[in-house]
Amino acid sequence: MSAVKHRIHQQWSVVGALYRLADVLCITAGLILASRAAPWTTAEHNLLAGAAAIVFHFILAEVCGMYRSWRGVSTGREIVTALLSWGCTLLALVALAAATRYTGEFSRTAMLLWFVATPVMIVAGRIVLRWAQWWLRAMGYNARTFAIVGVNKLGIELAQNIEHSPELGLRFAGFYDDRPEDRNPQIPDDVGRQVGSIDDLIARARDGQIDRTYITFPMRAEDRIRSVLEKLSDTTASVYVVPDFFVFQLLHSRWTDIHGLPVVSVFENPLYGIDGLAKRACDLFFGGVALLLATVPMAVIAALITLTSRGPVFFRQRRYGLDGREIRVWKFRTMRVCEDGPVAVQATKDDPRVTAVGRILRKTSLDELPQLFNVIGGSMSLVGPRPHPNALNEQFRTQVGGYMLRHKVKPGITGLAQVCGWRGETDSPDKMQKRIECDHRYIREWSLWLDLKILVKTVCVVFSQKNAY
């Protein structure tokens, strides 16, 4: 057997070192700029603050995953992680200063300048590094050669996705399969071609010509997958098995393990770890600001409801929250009745149950303002699938496939379905199906940027008053 000509790539890379060095330079540069703009008491305190910030930032950045490989991950997600890491660093610095009673030793103006200038430079540094990596990989530098085992729909889709992502730095060597070409699906001309058998792939991998191999056989082809893995174990190529999960209705998926046994989630809450913390922080901040601004309007609305109709000001209705747990959703009372029974009677156009004030509140969505209490309390979010009355949940969970999966995240005051035209009455399974499709899409594609876009679009939807009655 010939000697292996290809060595295993080290996981630690120069890029990781550059990221760490860039962060040190950004923190130091921000500190220097701030100290010159508003001089601190002594250089010793200046040096002490900088050293503490660097240490805290390195520790917290590792916890947040800032220095992992970002190949294939969006720039926005990296920037959010960087900002959250620096935010946690600030909290740690403030806590340390308070504990050691050093707060009086520093200029508040200089500290504020430092705290603001540093994240701006960190974000700018990451954008520059991203651009440099993208340019180098597009030019063929730092590239890895990959092959796909299995000529099928999944393999073709994988090749297309990688082709459309030059920043990954992956160069396609071709498809490999033991089946003759006439038995395989037609490969589009712009994707690639079948260049050989699996034995040909093994030979090239042994010679170091293939860095990565993606196996796209269907999961039922267990024997074929095992055979290929056994052969590839005699090479130093990185091997990835790509499960054909597209046969399922994926909601959100991630890999984890149970005592070393790898498992993959198919239906999962995307808001775990730093993402969940970020969304909760945004809910508390923006929800708190909105509640403060809405105090006077809510007081006026409460007075109008009291003066124009008999009954309570607020209406609390049982609905399903996160993981299907029952919550009580606050609303201003807009009807002459407070129905919360086993049968859901949705509001219709010119519904006689709606009061004169209630009709205005429903058209402008001002009746939803008390749900800010739910947001602050943690049972709801500003953005998420709109919660339905329990009776409506029980009615449609058997009629619409995947209905209950919408409860894998907290319900929201507004949601993707509401800004995509599916606001209002859902009097048929078809309408509900469209709303559920939007809810599933929101869970799959969630990001803080998506939440912000939905909030902005919600304002436009409210002013249009479409399907609001």
Image (cartoon, rainbow, N blue to C red):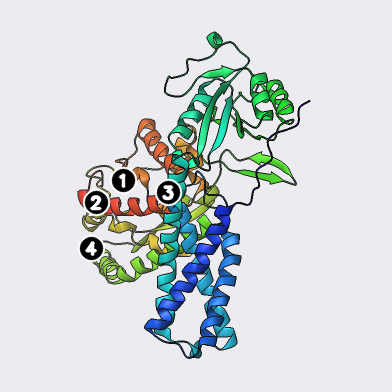
Location of mark 4 (residue): 308
Label pair 2/4, CB-CB below 8 angstroms: no
Q: How many other residues sit within 10 Å of disc 1, few (<14), some (14-19) or many (≥20)?
A: many
290 with respect to 82 (left or right): left
Earlier residue among tags 1 and 4: 4
Kind of residue at disc 2: Cys
Give 329 or 11, whichever is nearer the viewer. 11
Earlier residue among tags 2 and 3: 3
Location of mark 1 (residue): 419
Tell me if residue 400 can be seen: no
Label pair 3/1, CB-CB below 8 angstroms: no
Label pair 4/3, CB-CB below 8 angstroms: no
Label pair 1/2, CB-CB below 8 angstroms: yes
Q: Which one is in front in this view, the residue at disc 3 or the one at disc 1?
A: 1
Q: Secondary structure at mark 1?
A: helix
Location of mark 2 (residue): 460
Earlier residue among tags 2 and 4: 4
Residue at mark 2 to residue at mark 3: CA–CA distance: 21 Å
Kind of residue at disc 4: Thr
Earlier residue among tags 1 and 2: 1
Residue lying at 65% horizontally and 43% vertically, measured from the top left: 9
Kind of residue at disc 1: Val
Q: Secondary structure at mark 4?
A: helix
Earlier residue among tags 4 and 3: 4
Residue lying at 54% horizontally and 30% vertically, measured from the top left: 248
**x%, y% of residue 463?**
21, 52
Kind of residue at disc 3: Pro
**x%, y% of residue 152?**
54, 20
Location of mark 3 (residue): 387
Residue at mark 1 to residue at mark 4: CA–CA distance: 31 Å
Q: How many other residues sit within 10 Å of disc 4, few (<14), some (14-19) or many (≥20)?
A: few
